[in-house]
Amino acid sequence: MEIVIVPDAAAGGELIAAAIADLLIRKPDALLGVATGSTPLPIYEALATKVRETDLDVSRARICQLDEYVGLPKGHPESYRSVVLREVVEPLGLTESSFMGPDGSAEDIAAACLAYDQALAAAGGVDLQLLGIGTDGHIGFNEPCSSLASRTRIKTLTERTRVDNARFFNNLDEVPHHVITQGIGTILEARHLVLLATGEGKADAVALTVEGPVSAVVPASALQLHPHATVVVDEAAASGLKLADYFRATWAAKPSWQSI
């Protein structure tokens, strides 16, 4: 696991967008896994700027979804499909045909979960998966005590997560209780995992993820098991790291030819 401490969220967005651009130059049809919420927005904004202002060609890129609410009607503005189309696909000049995600409105949710896992495999696997982290250490919607071998499945949200996400709805009552999420085992199959965390509220979760034991109580700690995982944090989110100085020194000494 590589830990990169950046000054602020904008710097983290620029760094990760540059890594995505490098990937798309090497592999124009790369499958990019995207996360929702406010944290990854600087990544998407920086990447869209690169598309507008440089000769970066993303026309063959493919986008896939990390998770989805269960029970929201198709086209609901806060369904993650709608959010990804609005915040990622459209600003990059892509069409809905480049996008894949689980069906949270399916009658048979278990079948929809299995179908999505199979679709990711059939697409050749995820090349780079973006992740956020919850204040309780969850990734995707793999809440604490999720199996580290779990596959895409339905999960019940904790009240803490529902409260965290209520800001995207009119009130807490509108936040669904269930989601489809890629499992931790599914997430770990991506070739490169990139987690962005910003703000002091994420400091405890980041410290447990990076420096604590691998534990189902902190689902994000499973990134320690991945051969190519990058954790990008701003100064506030890094404030709980005991080895922060070492991580800064390691990044400063990194060869110029080696990207994240």
Image: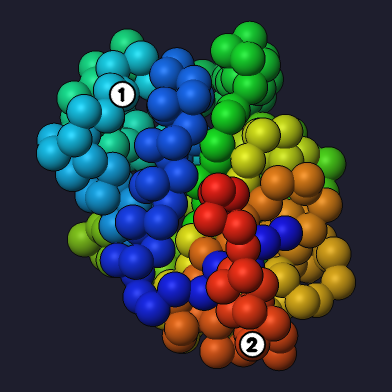
Q: Quadrant of the N terminus?
A: bottom right
Q: Residue 169 vs residue 163: left or right?
A: left
Rendering coords of residue 235 (x, y %): 46, 83
At x 43%, y 52%, the residue is 16
Q: Is residue 49 above or below residue 42?
A: above
Give the residue number, with chain letter if any, for mark 1. 58
Occupied quadrant, residue 163: bottom left
User: Residue 33: which disc?
Assistant: none
Give, as a three-letter code, the residue at label 1: Val
Q: Residue 117 vs residue 5: left or right?
A: right
Give the residue number, with chain letter if any, for mark 2. 245
Rendering coords of residue 146 (x, y %): 76, 53
Applied colour scheme: rainbow
Give, as a three-letter code, the residue at label 2: Asp
Residue at disc 1, secondary structure: loop
Residue at disc 2, secondary structure: helix
Question: As rendered, which of 43 and 20 lies closer to the eye?
Answer: 20
Q: Is residue 259 above or below residue 118?
A: below
**Observer able to see residue 199:** yes
Q: Residues within 10 Å of mark 1 (few under 14, many from 20)?
A: some
Rendering coords of residue 223 (x, y %): 73, 55
At x 66%, y 34%, the residue is 190
Residue pushed farthest left? 53
At x 73%, y 40%, the residue is 188
Circle nearer the N terminus (1, 2) = 1
At x 50%, y 46%, the residue is 130
Q: Is residue 105 above or below residue 174?
A: above
